[in-house]
Image (cartoon, rainbow, N blue to C red):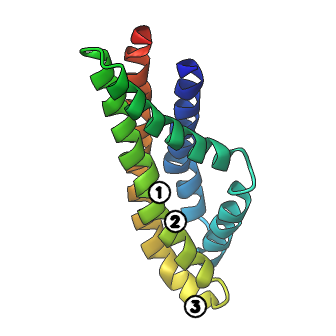
Amino acid sequence: MLVLLIVMTGLMAGVYFVFSVVIMKSLGELPPVQGAQAMNKINDVIINTLFLPIFFGSTLWFLGLIVWAFADWQTGQSLRVVTAALVYIVGMFLVTAFGNVPLNNRLKQSEADEVALAKYWAYYQNHWTRLNHLRTPSCMAACALLTLSLGAY
């Protein structure tokens, strides 16, 4: 079962990696209104894909692993599991929920006024991408730590 969580964590790392190195740079090369509109469309579409179940499912699974690790504490291994879970929950879930999502919501709210949308786009790109740069290594680190602890369970 942990192998599936490792795969899910790796998928999340891959999604965020592609956003950091390809998608946001590509959108940044478009005229501001078009880049912002494209990002709004991505944000609309992504919530109706497998992304959302993997996003929430992996987070809940990591929360469960914390409980499991404390219930069946194994020196060294359990610490890796708890660390992986905390890195993932804080660096992926909380950064997304309290950083990226509010930025996405404000971008969507600006959509009706192209002047406001273009003005907000520069701020959005900078801040959203910085937060995304945190999510990527958080997922990668959680994936690595969980892989290292696989032998214990």
At 39% from the left and 10% from the top, the residue drawn is: 152
Q: Quadrant of residue 136?
A: top left
CA gap between label 1 and label 3 equals: 26 Å
For the residues labelled 3 and 2, say whether their Cβ atoms are less than 8 Å apart. Answer: no
Mark 1 — residue? 96
Residue 92 drawn above or below residue 101: above
Identified by mark 3, the residue type is Val
Residue tagged 2:
101
Q: CA distance from mark 1 to mark 2?
A: 6 Å
The residue carrying pointer 2 sits among few (fewer than 14), some (14 to 19) or many (20 or more) residues within 10 Å by Cα, namely some
Q: Which circle, 3 or 2, is nearer the viewer?
A: 2
The image shows residue 34 at horizontal and vertical percentages of: 66, 73
* Quarter of the rendering occupied by the N terminus: top right
Which is nearer the N-term, disc 3 or disc 2? 2
Secondary structure at badge 1 equals helix
Q: Which circle marks residue 11 in the picture? A: none
> Dot 1: within a 10 Å radius of its alpha carbon, few (fewer than 14), some, or many (20 or more) residues?
many
Placement of 82 over or under 41, stated as above or below: above
Between 120 and 4, the residue placed more toward the observer is 4
Q: Residue at x 32, y 27 (%)?
A: 70
**Residue 18: percent from the left, percent from the top?**
56, 43
Which residue: 41% across, 40% down? 88
Q: Is residue 69 left or right of residue 5?
A: left
Q: Residue at x 25, y 16 (%)?
A: 76
Circle 2: residue type:
Val
- Cβ–Cβ under 8 Å for marks 1 and 2: yes
Residue 109: which quarter of the image? Answer: bottom right
Label 3: how many Cα within 10 Å (few below 14, some 14–19, many 20+):
few
Q: Nearer the viewer, residue 22 or 50?
A: 50
Q: Secondary structure at mark 3?
A: helix
Q: Answer yes or no: do the residues labelled 1 and 3 have beta carbons within 8 Å? A: no
